[in-house]
């Protein structure tokens, strides 16, 4: 039976705003404008519960000094997305963000295309997870909503799994109704399994005003990380309005759930 406190716990839904693509625009011309830290402050004022930034091996958007400034100045938790490499581990241990989300990274990809190969890389990931946790950093693994990946994540001692919503959002963009319901069912079962395995459940990638509500309705999910769409919308109506509108849709979906 679900007790009241468990029911309340299931209602919480945080928004992490990913500011990578503010840095993408800055880097298109070099220099300092637009500043991702300023965007992070505005996102927090607009209702973001945390800020996410992905420091990639090729530094195509977020830079090392962005991470240092975000960590030093943010008033909300910083979630550092990174590959599980020695270089990134050293950076994480230097700055000690609130959380590290381990993601797969291939140089030639445009964005993070799939979930981590948790099963194939178990022994390597175990060392990374342990060292980050020993430093007091919460560890999240960005995975597909796949039972074996969820079980392996729990076994590795991860605190969190972030379920990859990319395939669901792709099907939605293609107006593939059957594909959307298949992907949503996969996310629903994944969220249930991850919660049952004792993992905190997050989700993200490719979410928009049109796709966020179906994911926000899944009660086990406590955080959504959203970036590209919000930064794109900010061009038309400002970042504050974009964050506020996304938050309102999330809250509405949660009330309806
Ligand atoms: N979560 C993770 C783990 C990601 O890698 C990304 C993209 O950097 C996001 C969420 C945000 O995705 P998007 O920018 O498409 O909203």
Image: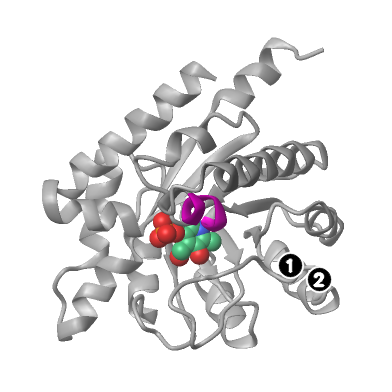
Colouring used for the render: one colour
Image quarter of residue 45: top left
Gap in angstroms between the C-alphas marked 2 and 1:
5 Å
The residue to which callout 1 is attached is: 129
The numbered dot on residue 126 is: 2
User: In x, y percent, where is residue 126?
Assistant: 81, 71
Quarter of the image for the N terminus: give it.
top right
Q: In the rendered view, does 229 fall on the left or right side of 84?
A: left
Q: Is residue 133 above or below residue 215?
A: below
- Which span of residues is magenta-colored? 166-171
User: In x, y percent, where is residue 119?
Assistant: 83, 69
Does the residue tagged 2 have its C-beta within 8 Å of any atom of ligand 1? no
Q: Residue at x 14, y 48 (%)?
A: 238
For label 1, the SS is helix
Q: Residue at x 43, y 77 (%)?
A: 110
User: In x, y percent, where is residue 11?
Assistant: 56, 24
**Residue 223, visible in the rendered structure:** yes
Image quarter of residue 158: bottom right
Q: Are marks 2 and 1 in contact (CB under 8 Å)?
A: yes
> Quick one: 76 or 142, which is closer to the camera?
142
> Quick one: 62 or 204, which is closer to the camera?
204
> Quick one: 96 or 12, which is closer to the camera?
12
Does the residue tagged 1 have its C-beta within 8 Å of any atom of ligand 1? no
Helix, strand or loop: magenta stretch: helix
User: In x, y percent, where is residue 77?
Assistant: 46, 51
Tag 2: Cα neighbours inside 10 Å, few (<14), some, or many (≥20)? Answer: some
Q: Is residue 120 above or below residue 139?
A: below
Q: Is residue 8 above or below residue 59?
A: above
């Amino acid at each position: 039976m679900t007790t009241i406190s468990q029911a309340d716990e299931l209602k919480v839904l945080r928004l992490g705003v990913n500011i990578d693509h503010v840095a993408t625009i800055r880097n298109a011309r070099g220099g300092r404008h637009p500043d991702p830290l300023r965007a992070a402050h505005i996102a927090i004022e607009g209702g973001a519960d945390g800020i996410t930034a992905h420091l990639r091996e090729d530094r195509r958007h977020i830079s090392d000094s962005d991470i240092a400034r975000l960590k030093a100045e943010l008033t909300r938790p910083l979630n550092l997305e990174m590959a599980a490499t020695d270089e990134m581990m050293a950076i994480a241990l230097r700055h000690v963000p609130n959380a590290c989300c381990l993601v797969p990274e291939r140089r030639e990809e445009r964005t993070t295309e799939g979930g981590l190969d948790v099963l194939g890389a178990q022994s390597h990931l175990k060392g990374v997870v342990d060292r980050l946790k020993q430093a007091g950093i919460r560890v999240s693994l960005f995975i597909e909503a796949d039972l074996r990946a969820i079980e392996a994540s729990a076994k590795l001692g991860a605190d969190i799994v972030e379920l990859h919503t990319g395939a669901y959002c792709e099907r939605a963009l293609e107006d593939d109704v059957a594909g959307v319901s298949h992907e949503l069912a996969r996310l629903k079962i994944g969220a249930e399994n991850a919660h049952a395995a004792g993992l905190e459940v997050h989700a993200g990638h490719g979410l928009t005003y049109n796709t966020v509500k179906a994911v926000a309705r899944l009660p086990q999910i406590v955080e959504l990380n959203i970036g590209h769409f919000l930064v794109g919308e900010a061009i038309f109506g400002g970042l504050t309005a974009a964050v506020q509108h996304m938050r309102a849709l999330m809250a509405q979906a949660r009330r309806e759930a």
